[in-house]
Image (cartoon, rainbow, N blue to C red):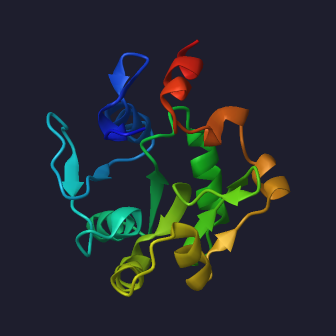
């Protein structure tokens, strides 16, 4: 996109505010992994990557370390139409593993998933050792990665994994 996605507007709201509002419908505590910056006018806790400069994997580790409870719902800011019921159903499949990760279009979706808070230290170590891929981290920690058929049986709508990657996506999604 060439800019900070969290601050982009979609249907009148910043993407970060939209993601927070979605999560507040199903969570008591919402934490935003905001990387090296602080997002202005955000009324929830923000955490920097852990370790610093390690991108989404470090952000996930920091967020999980900050959350109470056994699991956390994880949602990327560029997923404007998440399936919140789906996240709850994913949680019901969790049996103590690092994460339950759905698959869409042949790709695991670790940022529309349920992650165990206990794996935060392991994720930090992976990030510190040079791992950058959330999918690689999920596999290294033996997360459950649902196949597309398993995923399809749990979702309520097809747009749950649609993400905003290009400026044209912002316009197409609002049409």
x%, y% of residue 86? 64, 46
Compared to residue 96, the image places residue 27 above or below, namely: above
In depth, the one of 8 and 145 nearer the eye is 8
Picture residue at 35% right of the left edge, 67% below the top: 64
Q: Is residue 53 left or right of residue 100?
A: left
Picture residue at 62% right of the left edge, 37% below the top: 162
Q: Is residue 96 left or right of residue 73?
A: right
Compared to residue 170, the image places residue 42 above or below, namely: below
Q: Is residue 82 left or right of residue 116?
A: right
Picture residue at 29% right of the left edge, 51% below the top: 32
Q: Quadrant of the N terminus?
A: top left
The image quarter containing residue 173 is top right
Picture residue at 48% right of the left edge, 28% below the top: 167
x%, y% of residue 116? 47, 71
Compared to residue 13, the image places residue 144 above or below, namely: below
In depth, the one of 30 and 112 nearer the eye is 112
Q: Would residue 157 be visible to someone looking at this image?
A: no
Compared to residue 139, the image places residue 18 above or below, namely: above
Q: How many marks?
A: 0
Q: Quadrant of the C terminus?
A: top right
Q: Would residue 111 be visible to someone looking at this image?
A: yes
x%, y% of residue 112? 55, 52
Single out the residue that lies furthest toward the right: 149
Q: Is residue 39 left or right of residue 54?
A: left
């Amino acid at each position: 996109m060439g800019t900070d996605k969290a601050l982009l507007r979609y249907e009148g709201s910043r993407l970060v505010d939209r993601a927070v509002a979605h999560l507040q419908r199903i969570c008591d505590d919402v934490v935003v992994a905001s990387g090296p910056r602080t997002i202005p006018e955000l009324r929830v806790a923000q955490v920097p990557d852990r370790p610093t400069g390690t991108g989404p994997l470090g952000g996930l580790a920091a967020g999980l370390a900050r959350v109470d409870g056994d699991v956390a719902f994880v949602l990327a800011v560029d997923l404007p139409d998440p399936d919140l019921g789906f996240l709850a159903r994913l949680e019901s499949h969790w049996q103590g593993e690092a994460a339950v990760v759905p698959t869409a279009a042949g790709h695991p979706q670790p940022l529309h998933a349920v992650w165990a808070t206990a794996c935060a230290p392991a994720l930090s170590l992976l990030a510190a050792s040079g791992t950058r891929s959330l999918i690689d981290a999920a596999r290294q920690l033996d997360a459950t990665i649902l196949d597309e058929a398993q995923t399809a049986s749990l979702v309520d709508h097809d747009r749950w994994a649609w993400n905003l990657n290009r400026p044209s996506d912002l316009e197409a999604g609002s049409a």
